Image (cartoon, rainbow, N blue to C red):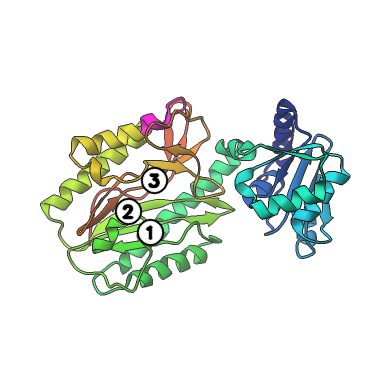
Amino acid sequence: MNADYSKRRKTVVRELAARGLDCLVVTHPPNWYYLTGFTGESGALVITGSGTTLLTDGRFTGQAKGETSGIKIEQQKGGLYSGLGELLLREGNESFGIDPGQLTITQWKAVKKAAGAKCKGVEAGGVVEHLRWQKDAGELALMRKAAILAGEVLEGALKLVRPGVRESEIGAEIEYQMRKRGASGPSFETIVASGRRGALPHARPTAKRLRKNELVVLDLGVILGKYCSDMTRTVYLGRAPKRIRRWYGAVQEAQAAGVAAVKAGVTCGQVDAAARDVLKKNGLEQFFVHSTGHGLGLEVHEEPRIARGQAVRLEAGNVITIEPGIYVEGVGGIRIEDDVAVRAGGNEVLTRVRRDLIEL
């Protein structure tokens, strides 16, 4: 993907001018990647109206020079955050924006001590994250590929889902297949939760062996070209009884209603309500214990939140998940999740695996 990093930085500079700030300090790796293309593990980015400087240590200076253009690379001479403070002082940035959610108190104290009394830090959280909400054509193309790849891996993994196989074996094979097919890795630790463990929404794979006549929740995502996918399907080992079929049908209907509600201009709360109301109608709302979805991109959990009462309106270019589920203690869980790109007049479902109840 040939991203226009310079254009993104110029957008940040305009936002700084509107806020009356000299510069923005970026310490969150996904954000500095979004603005420069730098994939290193340590650094701090300082963006001003006159230019951008990436401060990093000797392990990453060569990498930074190879991955970026149009910015200055500076090697730190001591600790990162004291070096950041010294850079701010040296460049005369008296007011700099910071994201308090991305700095510890200890890190902030080191910056403040080195920058001196003349430099004033101002809370400016979410400046870059808000830009990341709207994906451009290149980003959407990558996310589409990541979603399709996740689906291919999931469909391949179904061959392993049978009584006697350990959850951990399935999880390991899923993550191996991701890398074998070109992903850099999973976007989160793969969830394989069978039987009663499926009632834990974020259960991790264990040594538990799958058994006949139980539900199995498979939740996985890949990282492809730095972008994440995230999808869930639920299967039943054997012939599902009437109660399970009814529950699954309600979750499937709720998920379809949530997806159908997704379009630019609709509030996140309206999308959540579309899914939640279906489960309420079926007497299952008390078993739906989380929000309907979340934003997706360079991180597997981003804004906007698709949750009850959220007044934020969806915009064309957002990519979100729609993942209603029910979790019944002592029985298990049922969740169906897809990645959905928001369009002006509707949406595009990026994940392409069937949603009907799979009985194995």
Query: Would you name the residue on which mark 1 appears?
Result: 154
Vertical position of residue 295 compared to residue 226: above or below: above
Marks 1 & 3, CB-CB < 8 Å contact? no
In the rendered image, residue 217, in percent from the top left (x then y), is placed at 31, 58
User: Which residue lies at the image location 31% right of the left edge and 40% below the top edge?
Assistant: 255
Residue at left offset 29%, top offset 72%: 208
**Quarter holding residue 292:** top left
N-term-proximal mark, 2 vs 1? 1
- The residue at which mark 3 appears reads as 338
Element type where label 3 sits in the image: strand
Q: CA distance from mark 2 to mark 3?
A: 9 Å
Of 104 and 354, nearer the camera is: 104
Gap between marks 1 and 3 measured at Cα: 13 Å
Q: Position of residue 273 (x, y in %)?
A: 32, 32
Q: Position of residue 30 (x, y in %)?
A: 62, 49
Task: Say whether residue 72 is visible.
Answer: no
Nearest-to-viewer mark from 1 and 3: 3
Residue count near mark 2 (Cα–Cα under 10 Å), binned few <14, some 14–19, many ≥20? many
Asked if disc 2 and disc 1 are in contact, CB closer than 8 Å, the reply is yes
Dot 2 and dot 3 residues touching (CB under 8 Å): no
Q: Earlier in the sequence, mark 2 or mark 3?
A: 2
Name the secondary structure under disc 2. Answer: strand
Image position of 360 (left or right of 320)? left
What are the residue bounds of the magenta stretch?
A: 262-271
Tell me which amino acid carries mark 1: Leu
Label for residue 356? none
Q: Is residue 259 visible?
A: yes
Q: Amino acid at mark 3?
A: Asp
In the depicted structure, whether residue 322 falls above or below residue 264: below
Camera-side mark, 2 or 1? 2
Residue at the image point whose x is 31% and y is 32% from the top = 274
Residue that numbered label 2 is attached to: 233
